[in-house]
Image (tube, grey):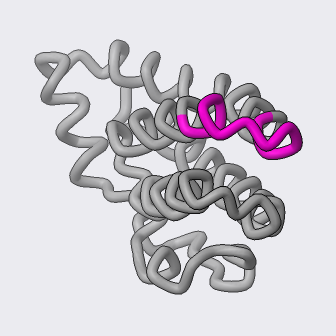
């Protein structure tokens, strides 16, 4: 699953160092199940929550960029980055880091350009997560 679904053209607007990262790191998803003492239902709930909340997180990032609100932008990106890291969304985690650096630099034009790439990465990641949720080993 880590490499399937990778599409360099979908990473448009991304920094080059994010393209080489796997979309999902299966080992992290396996560790998530282990973290919950092998209870797949808890891990599945966490992953489902990520998928469900990702559009709201993206909307908050878009709003912060539109308002040039650095503080809210960093908080919103940190929220997405932290949960992305917890589910093994390595590429998304790196993109959040790159965008947070742009927020700190006040590079709003670059951030506006990166939003479409971020949206695409979220969509690809969510598709892979839906496949994981539907797989037999996630039961």
Task: Quarter of the image for the C terminus: give it.
Answer: top left
Residue at position x 37%, y 40% from top? 87
Nearest the eye: 48 or 120: 120
Residue 77 colored in magenta in the image = no
Q: Is residue 59 left or right of residue 131?
A: right
Q: Where on the picture, by quarter, is residue 41?
A: top left
Kindly tell me whether residue 135 is visible in this rendering. Answer: no
- Residue 64, horizontal then vertical, whole percent: 76, 36
Instruction: Check the image and report above or below for 115 versus 10.
Output: above
- Which percent across, then down, holds residue 11? 67, 75
Q: Residue furthest right?
A: 66
The answer to which of 119 and 45 lies nearer the viewer is 119
- Is residue 65 magenta-colored? yes
- Whether residue 47 is visible: yes
Residue 127 relative to residue 34: left or right? right
Quarter assignment of residue 75: top right
Q: Is residue 73 left or right of 113 when viewed as pictured?
A: left
Report how many numbered discs are placed on residues in the image: 0
Dominant SS of magenta comes to helix
Q: Position of residue 78 (x, y in %)?
A: 47, 37
Which region is colored magenta? 64-74
Q: What residue do we see at 65% from left, 40% from top?
A: 70
Image quadrant holding the N terminus, namely bottom left
Percent x, y of residue 79: 50, 30
* Residue drawn 45% across the image and 74% down it: 3
Position of 119 relative to 53 (above/below) = below
Where is 56 relative to 58, above or below? above
Instruction: Identify which residue is drawn at 50% across, 34% down.
Output: 133
Q: Is residue 95 left or right of residue 44?
A: right
């Amino acid at each position: 699953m880590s490499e399937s679904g990778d599409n360099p053209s979908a990473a448009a607007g991304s920094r080059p160092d994010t393209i080489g990262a796997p979309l999902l790191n299966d080992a992290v998803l396996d560790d998530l199940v282990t973290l919950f003492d092998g209870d797949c239902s808890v891990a599945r709930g966490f992953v489902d929550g990520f998928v469900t909340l990702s559009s709201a997180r993206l909307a908050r990032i878009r709003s912060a960029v539109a308002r040039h609100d650095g503080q809210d932008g960093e908080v919103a990106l940190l929220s997405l980055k932290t949960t992305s890291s917890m589910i093994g969304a390595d590429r998304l985690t790196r993109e959040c880091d790159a965008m947070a650096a742009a927020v700190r630099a006040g590079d709003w034009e670059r951030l506006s350009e990166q939003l479409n790439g971020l949206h695409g990465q979220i969509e690809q990641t969510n598709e892979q997560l839906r496949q994981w949720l539907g797989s037999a080993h996630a039961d």
